[in-house]
Each structure stands twice: as C-alpha cells, then as structure tokens.
Amino acid sequence: MVDVAFGPKKGQRPNLSDNREAYLDMVRRKRMYGGILLVFFIGIMASGWMLAEERNAGDFWAGLPQILDFPAEVLLEAWANRANLPGLIWDHFPALIETINIAAVATLIGALTAMALSLLATRGLARWPRLIPLFRRTMDALRAIPEIVIALVLIYILGGGPVPAVIAIALHTGGALGKLFSEVAENADVKPVEGLTSVGANWSQRMWLGVIPQVAPNWLSYALLRFEINVRASAILGFVGEGGIGHDLKIAMQWGQGRYDEVVSIFLLLFLTIVLIDQISDHYRHKLVKGR
C-alpha cells in the first residue's frame, strides 16, 4: 500500500502511534523556523536602520525630543482661532465633494475593469484559459505601480486636475480589486455554469447568470472597502496638483503660520468624512455578506 502522507518510496517514518512525540516534533520545527525568520527580520531591520541613519541629514535621536513641536504649534494656533473653524470647514466643503467624486468615479471604473479581468483570469471560468497568465500579470502590474507615480506621469501628458487622479486611482483599483474578485470567483459553485453550458449558453451568459449572482455580495463588499481607500488616495493626490481637498491642504501648509487653523479645519473635515464613509460602508458590507 502506498503511504499517501509521505510518498510511495520506503524509508524512515516518524512513529505516528506516539501522538505526543509527533506533536513535540512539530512544535520544535515551528519554533526553529520561527527563530530563523525572526533573526532574518531583525537583521534586515538593523541594516535598514543603519543605512537610513547614514543618509539622514540630521540625527534621529537628537531630533526625537522635537517631534511634537510642529503639531503643538499647529494645534495652539488653531485653538486660538477656534471660532473660525466652522466657517473654514464650510469653505472647504466643495473641495471635499470634488475629492469624493474623484474617488467614486475611479472606484466605479476600477471595479468594472476588475470584474472583466478577474473572470478572464479565474481558473475554470476563463474565456481563454491559455491567456490566464497574461491577465494575472496585467493585474499584478496595475497593482504594483502606486497611484502617485501614475498621476505624476499623467500630469505631464494631461496637465493638472481631477482627470489624471481618476485614471491613476482607477488603474490601481482595477489591479487590486481584480485579485480579490478572482479569488472570490474561484470559490463559486460551477454547477450553475455547467447547467447553462448544457443548454447552449455562451460565455457571457454563463458568467452573468451563473457566476455573478453568487459572487456579487462579496464583490460589492470589496468595492465599498476600496472606495474608502480611494477617498484617502484622492486626498493624497491633491498634494501633486490633482485638485480636491488635498490641494487645499497643501496650499494651507505651504503658507505656514497664520494658516494653521485652516490646516486643522481641513484635517477635521477629512477625518469626519472618512469616519462617516467607514460607518456607512461597514453597515452595507455587513448587510450584503451576512444578509441582515
């Protein structure tokens, strides 16, 4: 009889009758591998720290006591002008709407792209199985390039504004969601697909009627989560001239003293918006996945 656990060849095998001995052997192996990984991680961290210290313009430890000086200066000025905060928040509300619009449009375009790429890259469902590696590497490439790098390239082509930000975030979203959507689709039940195939349905009909109804709740949940991330990303892209509330924050910080109350008002507005979006999307994600 073939030993399916250790292969067909004869040789020395552990004494499986002694459960305690097998368990202790497994624990020793885990500890050994864990120790090796820990030493490797500490070595990488130490070498990276020394390299950063060599390239740093100032000494980290010497500047550590001053780390709170700038935040304290900002907060003290904002507190002194706290009566202006509600008006400043209202003044920057249109920029916040622009930021949310950028994130929403980018998420929609990225999610639609991810749907197509994920179905074409899922084993057992792909339209062209031989092209699965191509579609997977495409998603890897879209995921690997940060949004800010894509945005900086597009600025030279399209100029500043929300359009480069939408394209940059949508491309990254397509790669990130495509990976997640593909993993969900791989766990879909293929029996409906087989039934549709037997009655002559084409590939698009099989996906639309047999796969998407199964994966739609999880896909929508991931898309909502990505929308939260894209709101933050669109605010960050404002620092490189892509519009929205990030651009207003950059200008306020460049002016320095005298505009710190404006900086705090923008941070408050962005923080409250992200908390609100998080609460709403969390509610709907839970409802979609759990069904209540």
Image (cartoon, rainbow, N blue to C red):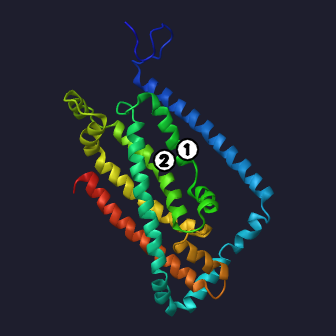
- In this view, the residue in front, 213 or 38, is 213
Q: Which residue matches tag 2?
A: 175
Q: In this picture, is 152 found above or below 45?
A: below
Q: Secondary structure at mark 2?
A: helix
Q: What residue do we see at 56% from left, 66% from top?
A: 236
Indicate left or right for 71 with 116 as reference. right
Pick the quarter of the image with the C terminus: bottom left
Residue 234 vs 150, above or below: the answer is below
Any part of residue 271 in sight: no
How many residues crowd mark 2 within 10 Å: few (<14), some (14–19), many (20+)? many
Q: Quadrant of residue 251?
A: bottom right
Indicate whether 39 appears above or below 239: above
Q: Amino acid at mark 1?
A: Ala
Q: Which mark is residue 141?
A: 1
Q: Which of the image's four quarters has the N terminus?
A: top left
Residue at horizontal 50 percent and vertical 93 percent from the top: 83
* Residue 236 located left or right of residue 128: right
Q: Secondary structure at mark 1?
A: helix
Left or right of 127, for residue 56: right
The residue lying toward the viewer, choosing from 265 and 140, is 140
Dot placed on the residue nearer the N-terminal end, 2 or 1: 1
Q: Are marks 2 and 1 in contact (CB under 8 Å)?
A: yes
In the figure, residue 242 lies in which quadrant?
bottom right
From the top left corner, tell me how far across and down residue 93 is, in percent.
45, 80
Q: Quadrant of residue 247?
A: bottom right
Find the distance from the CA under tag 2 to the CA under tag 1. Answer: 7 Å
Q: Position of residue 15 (x, y in %)?
A: 44, 16
